[in-house]
Image (spheres, coloured by chain):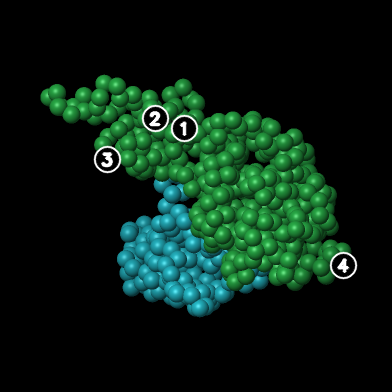
Chain colours: A cyan, B green
Amino acid sequence: MIQERISQEEIAALYADCAATLDDGEFERWPSFFAESCSYSVTSKENVDRGWPIALMSCDNRGMILDRVMAVRQSMLILPRVQRRIQSSVRIARLEGSVAHCRASFAVFETFAGQPTTVFATGRFVDEVVREGNALRFLKRTCILDSTLVPNSLPFPL
Amino acid sequence: MATIPSTRSSHSRLCWPEEGLTRIPQWIYSDPAVYAREQKRIFRGRSWQFVGLSAEIPKPGDFTRSYVGETPVIVARATDESISVLVNRCTHKGVQLCMAESGTTSTFSCPYHQWTFDLGGHLRGIPFRKGVDGQGGFSPDFDPSQHDLQRLAVTVRNGVIFASFREDMPSLEQYLGESNLAFFDRVFDGRPLRVLGKMKHRVHTNWKILVENFKDPYHATLLHVFFATFGIWRAGQHTQVRIDPSGGTSTLVQISPVVLKTRKAEDIEPTLAAEMKVFRKDLLALAYPELLDVVREFPDNEDTVTMQTIWPNCAVHQNLNSLGLRLALPRGPNQIDVYWTFFGYETDRPEMVARRLRHANFFGPAGLVTCDDLEVWQLNQRGLATEPFATSCVEAGGAGTTDADCVITETAVRAFYKHYRQVMDW
């Protein structure tokens, strides 16, 4: 079966839907944005520039993505907050066969109850997207933070 | 630790509560004068402070930036392979001359007037030193050797670099003491290290709150769901606390009774489970249980966790197969920049590297375990801000400051403040 070519509009919708899901705290829905065989990581520009493999958050497969959600919901102590993701420059960098190599810039704002809103993080996504069934899903998602200094904690996926 | 607002709390800024080491006056976490005294007596005082790994600067000319307390420094490998730690401040007018975080160079040149220093910090070049056309320039008596970059004392042990503002430092062996030296050498055993990467975050708490946490086996079994549920650190397992003679350095050790190749939430003794409210029998087995796959890798052949804190503000963890150094850099009384350096050994097979990277998920700002501490410290700091003259009570395990073989003890915290009071002259 010839797969329909992935379009810019579909990519924009995927990115918007995923960001809104995390903004709304619907973490149980987050794994549905990933392909069966997938990976996700959050690292810093410093690590990428130095060629260091460490990630602040790394999920090598779908199971680890599910376990991260479980930890967020059941095991980690996390002070309540609201996060708001703003994305820009969401684009397909190139198509290679069935894989769309995508990029985006992002900013995440954070608000604790009774506190002013602050900039939590900015950075970029380097992603691979495929069509699985009817939907687009992330085969690989890498979030690269601009700052080396994360404000305190990074409990939720970005 | 419980807070006891006490009428016996001292309102004199330089007076410890009369109960002694079973109390901590909470003004030490917030008072700017205390902070200034710490900078002078501790961070610029008689202490060895971690600045980097040899593996970060393997070749002559390699350098990286770090901090000793608040002071920015350059850690550089000279052409003779020796390591220099230089204050990152031009001796001309104080410009922070090294802008790059890391790299390879033969000289450090200040962008302002091009004063140029070699890898040992010696002033080697001043443009137009003799003026132009016989006009201006510096006197023939000007002695460049009086204007070298400030150099710190350096000691390197098994690939770990420490620096001090003091020239009269004891050896690292004497500094750590016998039992803590053994734990240091267990992880840093002379095998070449491999840097896996760094995590850094700005934490809104006093540096001593973090250090106390790493000396507190008591909280780990009660706060960290992952540790208690999966038997990584829990009450009922053999625990050791080993403290150096000064009190400032300590190692916490816990040994699991069985090797669990794949950990799962298991039955434990019911009274222990009742006390550890965070123990979650209902927590389903992980979707990817290999997350907790651990390989015994140290010669003592025990399934251990060790957490060593080196006076004043450095910690080394060996937990699952994750190895890391943590540095709590003070940035005012209510803030620290925490730098984590994760490492392995050059001889690690790819599967071990992959394991170490997976286990790093527990640590750092996104850590499945560390996050608990980070959030609690926020709550702690909020509580401290509202009652700065209250005292903390540290009576778990009695009143002593010596080694212990139990988990519900604050002996290492008391020992830390024994040394702290001596250094601060209180």
In the picture of the structure, the residue carrying the numbered disc 1 is: B151
Protein chain holding label 2 = B
Mark nearer the N terminus (1 vs 4): 1
Protein chain holding label 4 = B
C-alpha separation, residue under disc 2 versus residue under disc 3: 16 Å
User: The residue under label 1 is which amino acid type?
Assistant: Arg
Give the label on residue B112, or none: 3
Asked if marks 4 and 2 fall on the same chain, the answer is: yes
C-alpha separation, residue under disc 4 versus residue under disc 2: 64 Å
- The reply to whether dot 2 and dot 3 touch (C-beta < 8 Å) is no
Q: Tell which tag, 4 or 2, sits nearer the viewer.
A: 2
Q: Which of A40 and B122 is in front in this view?
A: B122
User: The residue under label 4 is which amino acid type?
Assistant: Thr
In the image, residue B161 above or below residue A144:
above
User: The residue under label 2 is which amino acid type?
Assistant: Asp
In the picture of the structure, the residue carrying the numbered disc 2 is: B148
Q: Dot 4, how many residues are within 10 Å of its Cα: few (below 14), some (14-19), or many (20+)? A: few
Q: Dot 1, how many residues are within 10 Å of its Cα: few (below 14), some (14-19), or many (20+)? A: many
Residue at 51% from the left image edge and 74% from the top image edge: A112
Q: Tell which tag, 4 or 3, sits nearer the viewer.
A: 3
- The reply to whether dot 2 and dot 1 touch (C-beta < 8 Å) is yes
Q: Tell which tag, 1 or 4, sits nearer the viewer.
A: 1
In the picture of the structure, the residue carrying the numbered disc 4 is: B271
What is the x, y in percent for residue A61? 57, 59
Residue at 78% from the left image edge and 40% from the top image edge: B301
Residue at 69% from the left image edge and 51% from the top image edge: B417
Q: What element carries label 4?
A: helix
